[in-house]
Image (cartoon, grey):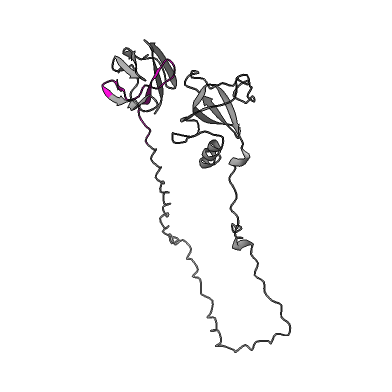
């Protein structure tokens, strides 16, 4: 896998200003940017046929990997939940660069050969005679067994117990996050975010940020009751919206859009 830092640098070179921490496959918020011109075509990829380019502002991207190739999927909050188009990220610039001046792999000692210089006419060393070895004693006499006498019984040694291998402790699994992350996005029908509005989910209150998002973490499976003030003012214009209870049977990674009197209440739910 390519270095994540190189992917981030390449995305910035392509003109995408990331506002979220990068992670492969995660939907990332970026500074809105416009791409292409109406009527132009994008190169087809392994993710589908070529799609029509768009003048909508791109405000979310997702980096995907397919058979060693990297693609960036472009999303617009004004164009629905499907990607608008894909851009291929050059893989050659993402490959890890070998370290210059790295020392080669050392040769094992088993493959090294000691080089002994060959010398001729070496002097013959003089051997000083040492003490003589002791004379071996007479051969030990083996007693002849008496006929009819019981043969001596040899007591066998107890078997040496084989030590049992000590099992290595298995690493404890890393704790998995519980629940879901639910992001509630408030925006006008023209796509403008509704900021600084208190939104409650099951009694927990969060305030929408500059992008109109209120994030709730470690939330159990629905249904959930989402409440907010009846009116919100954006650019001097007042908008009204009602409470809404989400679908209890919906799974993660599904997007909800509900129109309530001029306010688009978008519910984004993803796994923890």
Left or right side of 2 for 114: right
Residue closer to the observer: 168 or 12: 12
* Region in magenta: 175-204
- Which quadrant: the N terminus? top right
Residue that appears at 55% across and 84% down: 133
**Which is more toward the observer, 91 or 150?**
91
- Residue 213: percent from the left, percent from the top? 37, 25
Which residue shows up at 59% across the image and 21% down it?
53
Q: Quadrant of residue 258?
A: top left
Percent x, y for residue 80?
49, 18
User: Image quadrant of residue 240?
Assistant: top left
Residue 187 position within the rendered picture, expressed as x and y whole percent measured from the top left: 39, 19
Residue 200 magenta: yes
Q: In the image shown, does 198 or 165 lie closer to the viewer?
A: 198
The structure residue drawn at horizontal position 50% and vertical position 22%, both measured from the top left corner, is 76
Q: Is residue 115 above or below residue 106?
A: below
Horizontally, is 149 left or right of 203 in the view? Answer: right
Tally the numbered discs. Answer: 0
* Residue for point 64% across, 61% down: 111
Q: Residue furthest front?
A: 236
* 57 horizontally vs 241: left or right: right
> Which residue is farthest left?
203
Q: Quadrant of the C terminus?
A: top left
> Which one is nearer the viewer's eye here, 176 or 69?
69
């Amino acid at each position: 896998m390519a270095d994540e830092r190189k992917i981030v640098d390449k995305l910035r070179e392509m003109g995408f200003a990331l506002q979220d921490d990068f992670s492969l496959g995660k939907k990332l918020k970026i500074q809105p940017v416009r791409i292409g011109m109406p009527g132009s075509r994008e190169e087809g990829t392994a993710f589908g046929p070529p799609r029509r380019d768009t003048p909508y502002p791109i405000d979310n991207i997702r980096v995907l990997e397919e058979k060693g190739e990297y693609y960036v999927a472009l999303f617009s909050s004004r164009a629905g939940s499907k990607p608008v188009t894909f851009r291929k990220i050059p893989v050659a610039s993402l490959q890890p660069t070998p370290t210059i001046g790295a020392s080669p792999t050392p040769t094992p000692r088993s493959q090294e050969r000691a080089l002994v210089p060959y010398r001729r006419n070496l002097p013959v060393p003089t051997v000083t005679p040492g003490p003589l070895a002791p004379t071996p004693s007479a051969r030990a006499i083996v007693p002849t067994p008496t006929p009819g006498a019981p043969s001596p019984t040899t007591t066998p040694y107890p078997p040496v117990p084989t030590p049992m291998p000590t099992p290595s402790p298995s690493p404890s699994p890393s704790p998995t996050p519980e629940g879901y992350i639910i992001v509630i996005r408030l925006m006008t029908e023209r796509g403008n975010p509704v900021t600084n509005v208190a939104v409650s989910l099951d009694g927990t209150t969060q305030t929408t940020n500059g992008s109109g998002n209120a994030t709730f973490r470690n939330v159990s499976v629905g249904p959930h009751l989402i409440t907010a003030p009846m009116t919100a003012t954006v650019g001097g214009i007042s908008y009204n919206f009602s409470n809404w209870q989400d679908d209890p049977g919906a799974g993660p990674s599904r997007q909800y859009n509900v129109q309530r009197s001029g306010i688009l209440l978008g519910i984004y739910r993803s796994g923890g």
